[in-house]
Image (cartoon, rainbow, N blue to C red):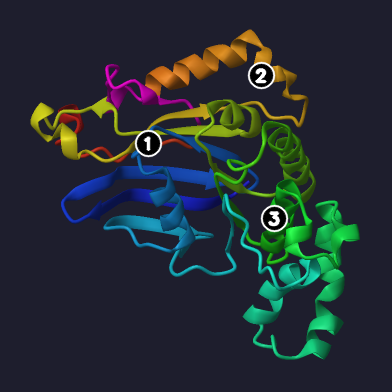
């Protein structure tokens, strides 16, 4: 598969505060990337940069070899809170993106003729065709999140961004949607960039797990450590087949969780930037000479 998302030498700074520090990443079409990291490491900032809501202070972000500029149909987004209009039916919510982007939102005939069948197709894909004429308040939290996924999918984005999409759901609903998302990813051939605070969820869902953290060391010296932003400190290859959540009880799964805790969440365990666990074949680093003097 070809490279879909390319991030090279990206920094993000707010005033004097560095949030992201020299991020390098390549994601291929069809990958399911999950992202974890401690509070303040820049997970949501990275997602907003990919979406185009914000621009990097330095570096480049490309999707399909084109600069990722303002938000457009190349990127779908599903948030933790459902982006549904309460005064519109489920079907109207799903079809809205198509009619707005094509400039014919005011024309009911155009909407009905060209897009309702497509919206019903995606509602069927998320198993909500029977709820097409209901309003959001008539649906459970899990059903509303599936509508939000259909909203994103109808735009056929090359990459689907998900920011803690199941974080507000009860455990049973969350587990059901995890399996549902895996099934949808396999059948639709999606490319997903999934931010979560739940390491079990990240290890279960992804084909690739990125650990973003501000807990690391380099050759810039201890005095600057407080203003170092998050880096990708680990990039794990995960085997992926949609399966039962029982795999989470496997000893190897638990060992991976413990490894990730040490790599990215332990402020006492500071890996040097040259020693990051970047196992994925597409991983790369653009370390500066100041970060790793042997690289000069």
User: Bounds of the magenta span?
Assistant: 264-280
Along the line of sight, which residue is nearer the eye, 160 or 22?
Answer: 160
Residue displayed at 36% across by 44% down: 42
Where is residue 131 shown, x and y percent of the image? 86, 60
- Residue, disc 3: 149
Along the line of sight, which residue is nearer the eye, 296 or 173?
Answer: 173
Q: Earlier in the sequence, mark 2 or mark 3?
A: 3
Is 223 left, or right, of 287 in this rendering? left
Q: Residue furthest left?
A: 223
Which label is found at residue 248? 2
Callout 3: 10 Å neighbours few (<14), some, many (20+)?
A: many
On screen, residue 287 above or below 276: below
Q: Can residue 273 be found in the magenta stretch? A: yes
Q: Earlier in the sequence, mark 2 or mark 1?
A: 1
Residue displayed at 33% across by 40% down: 40
Q: Is residue 103 visible?
A: yes
Q: How far separated are the C-alphas under marks 2 and 3? A: 25 Å
Q: How far separated are the C-alphas under marks 2 and 1? A: 24 Å
Along the line of sight, which residue is nearer the eye, 80 or 134?
Answer: 134
Is 223 left, or right, of 69 in this rendering? left
Is 264 left, or right, of 121 in this rendering? left
- Residue, disc 1: 39
Q: Secondary structure at mark 2?
A: helix
């Amino acid at each position: 598969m070809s490279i879909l998302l390319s991030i090279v030498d990206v920094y993000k700074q707010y005033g004097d505060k560095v949030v992201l520090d020299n991020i390098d990443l390549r994601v291929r079409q069809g990958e399911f990337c999950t992202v974890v990291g401690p509070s303040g490491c820049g997970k949501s900032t990275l997602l907003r940069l990919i979406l185009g809501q914000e621009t990097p202070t330095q570096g480049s972000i490309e999707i399909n070899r084109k600069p990722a500029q303002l938000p457009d149909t190349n990127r779908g987004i599903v948030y933790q809170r459902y982006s549904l209009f309460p005064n519109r039916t489920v079907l109207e919510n799903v079809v809205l993106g198509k009619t707005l982007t094509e400039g014919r939102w005011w024309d009911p005939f155009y909407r009905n003729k060209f897009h309702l069948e497509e919206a019903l197709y995606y509602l069927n894909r998320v198993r909500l065709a029977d709820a097409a004429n209901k309003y959001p308040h008539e649906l459970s939290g899990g059903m509303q999140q599936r509508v939000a996924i259909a909203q994103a999918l109808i735009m056929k984005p090359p990459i689907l961004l998900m920011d803690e999409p199941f974080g507000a759901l009860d455990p049973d609903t969350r587990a059901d949607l995890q399996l549902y998302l895996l099934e949808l990813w396999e059948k639709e051939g999606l490319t997903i960039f999934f931010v979560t605070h739940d390491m079990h969820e990240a290890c279960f869902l992804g084909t690739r797990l990125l650990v973003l953290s501000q807990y690391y060391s380099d050759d810039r010296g201890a005095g600057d450590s407080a203003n170092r932003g998050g880096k990708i400190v680990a990039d794990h290859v995960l085997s992926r087949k949609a399966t039962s959540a029982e795999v989470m009880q496997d000893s190897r799964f638990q060992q991976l969780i413990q490894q990730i805790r040490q790599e990215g969440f332990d402020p006492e365990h500071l890996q040097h930037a040259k020693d990051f666990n970047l196992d994925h074949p597409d991983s790369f680093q653009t370390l500066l000479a100041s970060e790793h003097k042997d690289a000069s």
